[in-house]
Image (tube, rainbow, N blue to C red):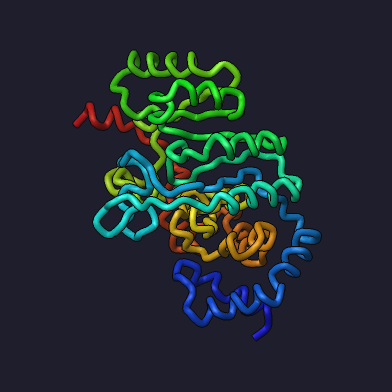
Amino acid sequence: MSMLNYLEKPIDNLNNNPSKKNANINKFLIKLGIYKLIAFVLRKTSGFPIWSNLEIDIQSACNRDCEFCPRYHDRSGIRKDAYGRQIMVKMPSEQVYQFIDQASRLGFKGKIKLHRLSESLLDKRYLEFAQYIKAKGLRLCENTNGDVLRKNEALCVQLDGLIEHLTIGLYDYHNEQEKQTEMAYWRSKFKQTEVAFSIPPENCTIRQGAQVYLEVMKNPAALDLPCTQPNRMMLIRYDGNVSLCCEDDGCHFDLGNAFEQSLQEIWWSYKHIKIAKTLEKPSGRHRFKRCSQCYNGQERINLLQRKNSN
Ligand code: SF4
């Protein structure tokens, strides 16, 4: 079997985890340095640019359980176990530093976030990672539900300016006045960091794994939209596995594990580039099971309005 055939074959079968045999072949090819060589050639020749967003999931947990979040129904052992209990695992610190270093060596200048489907500020190491990123001249941007910061005034002061852009999720308000009060509170806490807000009660994306996904009307036209997330995002889960996009916390596309391979090898792999190029096209979503059920491009939902009208 030629290298090209081997890499091409999984494209219609990307949603299944690799068989043990495939995993062994992969390990063998990694050892031989084949993926390194492919990445080197494709980086130079493919015109496929480096990611613009890097997310490093420094730990697995979140203190909330929101119905609009893709982790809500997870029972796979990635975010929650079979009984719905939180999985609590930290990425080793040396791996976090290594990823930051690798990105810096590749000339990456975009945004770094220290979470995936998790609340990164639960991790006491957050401040030291933030300082390291800033010292490297890189840009730290973050999303948080704000719960840790609300109880820790000193941390707000320490992070002010270290984080370039902070998006705070407002999840608990019931009306415009409460929302505005919350916004004013958070703006008063940060003088140098740019603060923005996500407001899922009024502006909720439909995401697989969320309760909302099961309840709302979906627009089939959304499945014909091109998707460019795989061209922009390098997403490393706490266990090193790499997700294709924000909707792929299960790492269903089997792109590789960043504890075992370099970011360069994974990003400029034939498989990743081929998937990204397929999804750039309007009908691309229909090629992959996960994408053919992905309505994240459709009009957002106003949950407050829905609740009030029921
Ligand atoms: S279409 Fe596919 S690649 Fe794009 S966000 Fe949805 S699941 Fe991810």
Q: Depth check: 109 or 48 in front? A: 109
In percent of the image, x 34 and y 13: which residue is there? 177
Q: Is residue 227 above or below residue 151?
A: below
Question: Left or right: 104 with respect to 162?
Answer: right
In percent of the image, x 75 and y 69: which residue is there? 37
Q: Which residue is at the far bottom?
A: 1
The quadrant of the image that shows the C terminus is top left
Q: Is residue 59 above or below residue 63?
A: below
Q: Does residue 178 appear in the picture of this structure?
A: yes
Q: How many numbered badges does the structure rendering display?
A: 0
Instruction: Find residue 234 and report its horizontal and vertical position in percent.
Output: 60, 51
Q: Depth check: 92 or 81 in front? A: 92
Q: Depth check: 4 or 111 in front? A: 111
Q: Which residue is at the far right?
A: 44
Instruction: Find residue 269 and report its horizontal and vertical position in percent.
Output: 66, 64
Q: Is residue 198 above or below residue 13?
A: above
Instruction: Find residue 195 and report its horizontal and vertical position in percent.
Output: 53, 23
In percent of the image, x 38 and y 14: which residue is there? 181
Q: Does residue 224 appear in the picture of this structure?
A: no
Q: Is residue 309 above or below residue 92?
A: above
Q: Which image quarter: residue 250?
A: bottom left
In percent of the image, x 47 and y 38: which residue is there? 124
